[in-house]
Image (cartoon, helix red, strand yellow):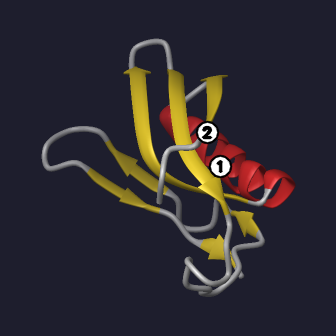
Amino acid sequence: VESVGQYDINLEAQDMEQLLVDWLSELLFLHGANNMVFGFFKVDLDEKKNRLSAHVFGEPFNISKHKIGVEIKAVTYHMLEVRNKRPYHVQILFDI
């Protein structure tokens, strides 16, 4: 994925679980609304304030270049788990 387009994302949530869902939902929205795929991310995370600032880089989806997989319809809270102590662990399920 080439870095021909950039989007800035700034999020704040009441906890890390909500922040993860918001982050993935924003990426899903950008993919759907702008037909973008992303391959490079610069992310600053403030775990104490549950804030995320990111620059995401990508290019428009091209069927001849990008492989089509299963379409994600939504990010869910079902079985959501974020463990931010070593060893780090995230579990999340998507609606497909």
Could you classify mark 2 by the number of other residues whose Cα lies within 10 Å: few (under 14), some (14-19), or many (20 or more)? some
Q: Position of residue 53 (x, y in %)?
A: 53, 21
Q: Is residue 36 above or below residue 19?
A: below
Residue denoted by label 1: 27
Residue 41 falls in which quadrant of the image? top left
Q: Residue pushed farthest top?
A: 49
Nearer to us in this view, 8 or 20: 8
Label 1 sits on a secondary structure element that is helix
Q: From mark 1 to mark 2, how far is it between C-alphas?
A: 14 Å
Looking at the image, residue 15 sits to the left or right of residue 13; the answer is: left
Q: Amino acid at mark 1?
A: Leu
Q: Is residue 93 above or below residue 14?
A: below
Residue 28 visible in the shown view:
yes
Residue denoted by label 2: 18
Nearer to us in this view, 6 or 52: 6
Q: Position of residue 73 (x, y in %)?
A: 77, 72
